[in-house]
Amino acid sequence: MGFVLAGCTAIEDPSANSEMMVADDGTEVECRRIKEMGTMLGKRVCMEPTEWEEVDRAAEEGAEDFMGSSRGAGQGPDSPGL
């Protein structure tokens, strides 16, 4: 994959903020507007749909990992007192 997204980047809802285009070499690419923390304007990133699937999957896994680690010991839904 040719593009890596780092920590403070948000990809808006792909269905509301993407468009399909044909690149110069004839391949179909999906373009999305990426917002970065600390900036008001985003930047447009175009990748093949299979590359976006990898990015979306990694973002979802990262969010799940974060949510799991933020619970901490003794703070889960089965903990006494909750």
Image: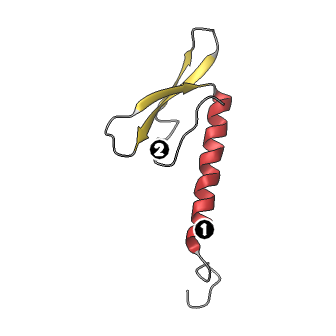
Q: Is residue 27 left or right of residue 10?
A: right
CB under 8 Å between callouts 1 and 2? Answer: no
The amino acid at mark 2 is: Thr
Quarter assignment of residue 23: top right
Provide residue 65's location: percent of width, then percent of height. Answer: 63, 60
Is disc 1 surrounded by few (<14), some (14 to 19) or many (20+) residues within 10 Å? few
Q: In the shown orientation, is residue 81 left or right of residue 12?
A: right
Q: Earlier in the sequence, mark 1 or mark 2?
A: 2
The mark found on residue 69 in the picture is: 1
Residue 6 lies, in percent from the top left, at 53, 44
Identified at 45% across, 27% down, the residue is: 44
- The image's mark for residue 43 is none
Q: Which quadrant: the N terminus?
A: top right
Toward the left, the furthest residue is 40
The location of residue 52, given as percent across then percent down, is 62, 34
Instruction: Tell me: 13 left or right of 54.
Output: left
Q: Nearer the viewer, residue 32 or 43?
A: 43
Distance from disc 1 to disc 2, alpha carbons, whole Å, reads 20 Å
Residue at the location (47% across, 44% down)? 9
Q: Residue at x 55, y 86 (%)?
A: 82
For mark 2, what is the residue? 9
Query: Of 53 and 40, which appears nearest the observer?
Result: 40
Looking at the rendered structure, the kind of residue marked 1 is: Ser
Q: Residue furthest bottom?
A: 81
Answer left or right for 81 relative to 27.
left
State the residue in front, 78 or 25.
25
